[in-house]
Image (cartoon, grey):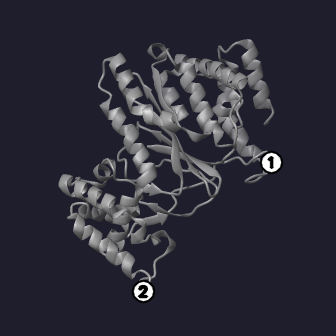
Amino acid sequence: MKTGTINLPLHGGKAPGWLFEKMKRLARQIVLVIIEEYGPYEFIDRISDPYWFQAFGCILGFDWHSSGVTTTVCGALKEALRGISSYTGIYVAGGKGGTSRKTPSEIEAASEKEGSDFSRLVYASRIVAKVDSSALQDGYQLYHHSFIFSKDGKKWSVIQQGMNGDTRYARRYHWLSSKITDYVIEPHNAICCDSKNEVLNLIASDSSPARKVITEISHQKPEQVLKELAGICGHSEKSLVLPKRHEINFSDIEKKRLAKIFQSTYEQKPEDFEKLIAMPGVGPKTVRSLALISELIYSAPYSIKDPARFSFAHGGKDGIPYPVDKINYNKSIEVLSNALKESKIGRTEKIEAFKRLALFY
């Protein structure tokens, strides 16, 4: 289940070395307290929650409302738990940029260490990224992917983030495994952001006809699919008035590459939409082209609703995107306040954490 999405302003720079070291130390202590009291599954549940994650970032002392909190907190968490997974029962794989692409190999390394088959976790990591980049096209290019999982492989959480260079905002996606019923049908438990746009949303319930038709189209011969796509784009300027979401020209498409992908789908004939988007080479352009054909030729419309349900961001200290909402902010940090009071964190670090919390009450 996807447990939340948050929009955050993009800020430059990075956490100074001295702060990052403190973040690692405090993160380790907080995680150890939670695991000792409630077990590793509870921590995975908590880290998947956007409110708890944000509060966790506040306590660690990072710039809580910028995009950097995602990458820095996940990075600190990974370093904090490195080498002690046998004790904590938790592994952290992936990260920002090129590190995100190492997620499968890091999961496989844990698989070898634990003597268990984690191939389904590797698949989970890949399909989650495919869903948020191809099945839900909301204008954010993914650049961060952290995969947090129990050493028995029974529970996992994904925290990934995308960037929109035009709006200078990032969007964070939280996933939790325990309640997943289908990767491509309403996987969201909560999506939070401050604005909604028209998007290509093929994971909405309303998109069920489109998912079915798109899968069927992928079974057609490549030349037939390309012919239908050319017909759509070729007539758009003459007689077909298309909304903004349909603005795609046949000249923008690499015909040879698209034909190669359609040949692959034709040969493999994926049994459903999930299997289709999981195929290598099937990315946003392929899915978008098939969605256009499904709606304009086969009358199988897809949803254009942004799946955001309520506002999450607390605002910014500089008034951007709006002044800090202290009531909601206090609710976010309250979830960790009680845990700190009875934790076994060192006295000095505990006092420093409480001082940071007190600044926002």
Q: Residue at x 28, y 49 (%)?
A: 275
Q: Quadrant of residue 266?
A: bottom left
**Where does the image place residue 295, in percent across and percent down from the top left?**
35, 72
Number of marks: 2
Disc 2 residue type (three-letter): Lys
Q: Quadrant of residue 359?
A: top right
Q: Which mark is residue 238?
A: 2
**Where does the image place residue 217, in percent across and percent down from the top left?**
26, 64
Check disc 2 and report its element: helix, strand or loop: loop
**Where does the image place residue 39, in percent across and percent down from the top left?**
49, 21
Q: Is residue 187 visible?
A: no
Q: Which mark is residue 318?
A: 1
Q: Residues within 10 Å of mark 1 (few under 14, many from 20)?
A: few
Q: Which mark is residue 178?
A: none
**Where does the image place residue 158, in percent across and percent down from the top left?**
47, 37
Q: Which part of the image, by quadrant, shows the N terminus?
A: top left
Q: Residue at x 46, y 17 (%)?
A: 85
What whole-number distance in Å separates the C-alpha atoms at marks 2 and 1? 48 Å
- The residue mark sitting in front, 2 or 1, is 2
Residues at circles 2 and 1 in contact by the CB criterion of under 8 Å: no
Q: Residue furthest bottom?
A: 239
Disc 1 residue type (three-letter): Asp
In this rendered view, identify the residue nearer to me: 265 or 275.
265
Check disc 1 and report its element: helix, strand or loop: loop
Q: Residue at x 23, y 70 (%)?
A: 224
